[in-house]
Every structure is written in C-alpha cells, then in structure tokens.
Image: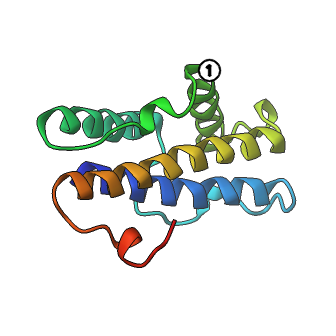
Amino acid sequence: MKCLYDLRDWIYECDRFLFLAEVHYRKPDVVPSDHEFNCDFDIGSFESIFESAKEQSSNELCCIRFDTCVSDKEFLFFKTTLECVVSEKWAHIEIRDILRAQEILHEIAKNLINDIRVTHEMQGHPSLHEALNIN
C-alpha cells in the first residue's frame, strides 16, 4: 500500500514539474530544474516506483489497474516528454507535448486514486467516499 502512496506523491510532484515546464514556454527564465521537489524526475525513479507498486499488488491485497489506463504509446510519449523536460531539451518538444504529458499523468493519477480507494475497501477499511456520499 505504501508504494501506491509513494507513486501518488511522485505524480503530484511531477505535475508541478510539468506545470513549470509549461510556464517556461511563456516565461523562459522559469526553468523547472531550478526549483526544489521532493523526488527525482528521471525515468528510472518513476519506473522503479511504478514497478514496485505493481509487484506489491501481487504480494498483498491490492487493486492495481492504473497501469492499464493509458496505452503503451501514450506511456512512451509521457516518458519521452518528461525526459526532454528533465534534460532541458526544449528544442525537442513543444508546449502541446507538455500539455499532453500532463493529461496522461492526470489519467494515471485519477486511476491510481481509485485503486487506492478500492484497495482500502478490499482490506476492510470503510470508504470515506461512500460515508460522505462523494462520487
């Protein structure tokens, strides 16, 4: 379960990172790597957390479906765009690439949050969403 939360935290930080990349196109003096974040954005760290969450699901009572919410092509596009932003290869990407990468990240995040909720329910924890009638 901790891996799901670690991945969620990484996604939130990555969303901030990509937002700053988007701002960079409007104000070139804003560079995402000049800001502090709680994690690294290299693809290796993401894949490590991603794989760890999938592996944990096979060892515990976990619901993992977030990894199927985007196609392999979309996932590759996200990773490539993120890598260009990390290495500041601004000439290789356009603002629409960053916006598309953000959409893909939001789709993964939405599904991950649902997986966390379902996992809590599978483990017998009450659903706050149902108790508060939030959908």
View extreme (bottom): residue: 132
Pinpoint residue 131: horizontal percent, then vertical percent: 35, 76
Pinpoint residue 129: horizontal percent, then vertical percent: 40, 69
Between 12 and 119, the one lying in front of the other is: 119
Q: Please say whether residue 6 is visible from this viewpoint.
A: no
Q: Residue at x 69, y 60 (%)?
A: 20
Tag 1: amino acid:
Lys
Q: Is residue 126 above or below residue 15?
A: below
Pinpoint residue 45: horizontal percent, then vertical percent: 37, 40
Q: Is residue 109 above or below residue 76?
A: below
Between 101 and 35, the one lying in front of the other is: 101
Specify the color scheme.
rainbow
Give the residue pinned by disc 1: 73
Q: Please say whether residue 127 is visible from this viewpoint.
A: yes
- In-image side of 35 versus 49 (left or right): right
Which quarter of the figure has residue 83? top right
Which quarter of the figure has residue 39? bottom left
View extreme (top): residue: 73
Q: Residue at x 53, y 53 (%)?
A: 14
Q: Residue at x 78, y 35 (%)?
A: 93
Label 1 environment density (alpha carbons within 10 Å; few <14, some 14–19, many ≥20): few
- In-image side of 25 versus 127 (left or right): right
For label 1, the SS is helix
- In-image side of 71 versus 50 (left or right): right
